[in-house]
Image (cartoon, rainbow, N blue to C red):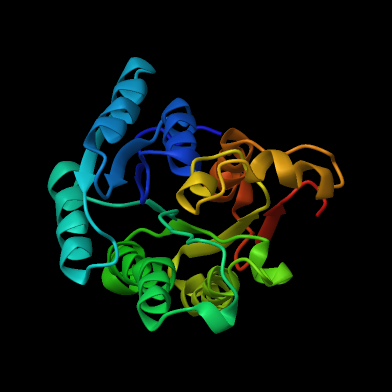
Amino acid sequence: MSASGKILLVTGGSRGIGAATCRLAAKAGYRIAVNYASNAKAAEAVVADVDAAGGEAFAVKADVGSETDVLAMFEAVDGRFGRLDALVNNAGVVDQSARVDELSAARLESMMRINVIAPMLCAREAVKRMSTRHGGKGGAIVNVSSIAARLGGPGQYVDYAASKGAIDSFTIGLAREVAGEGIRVNVVSPGIIDTEIHASGGQPDRVERMRKVVPMQRVGTAEEVAAAILWLLSDEASYTTGANLEIGGGR
């Protein structure tokens, strides 16, 4: 699955699934832009891991919920590598468990800005660089959704589930829009994965609690999701676009 010399941008690349994707991509030969929002130390640790594996990476700070930051991030990638071959829209947030009748407008706006608007803006900039319509040589985009889009998140985070449902729909539409322009667009939908996002949503014990509801009786790892992402980016998936690959242990 060699991608020697190809340029990959991973949003939210400093932790969890994003970091695992960067590390695995380095082994496949990608040169990588590791996006992070605030934790420079974590991003630099990922860069160091990539360098140690014989790859090339750099960290780029950007709040992907800000169009100004998104534009600056893509310009930084242009300046460092001169082109873009692949994008992984991984950055996302979850919030405290709450019912819909407890949600504030501020929470909803933040959730949709980061989980929906941000990946759409990033995809827009990627298409401008990859599409043969714009003089590019094609490429691949993988969006990171969640099986919550199918389950709905009742009693916990319907807003998060809805934001991921939007990503699923966006993936289908964009895939069909640019399929004739050399760009493949797919989505992965992880289930319960052992990452820091659960603690950020106020449920550090959620992974262990939810293990019992997974048919495989275990949670997934960030590396298992990263492997699926790398396959979708690779030439081995050359006839795959608009697909939603669930990685949820059968849930």
Residue closest to the eye, 210 or 64: 210
Is residue 195 found left or right of 106 in the rendered image? right
Where residue 15 appears, x then y in whole percent? Answer: 41, 38
Residue 216 versus residue 239 in the image, above or below: above
Q: Residue furthest front?
A: 102
Residue 35 versus residue 29 in the image, above or below: below
Whether residue 243 can be seen here: no
Is residue 66 found left or right of 6 in the rendered image? left
Determine the residue positioned at 37% across, 43% down: 13
Where residue 173 appears, x then y in whole percent? Answer: 54, 80
Where residue 71 appears, x then y in whole percent? Answer: 18, 64
Residue 39 versus residue 46 in the image, above or below: below
Where residue 142 appears, x then y in whole percent? Answer: 50, 57
Residue 55 versus residue 101 in the image, above or below: above
Q: Is the C terminus in the top left, top right, bottom left or bottom right quadrant?
A: bottom right
Whether residue 24 can be seen here: yes
Is residue 185 found left or right of 218 in the rendered image? left
Residue closest to the eye, 52 or 217: 217
- Quadrant of res 49: top left
Determine the residue positioned at 24% across, 46% down: 38
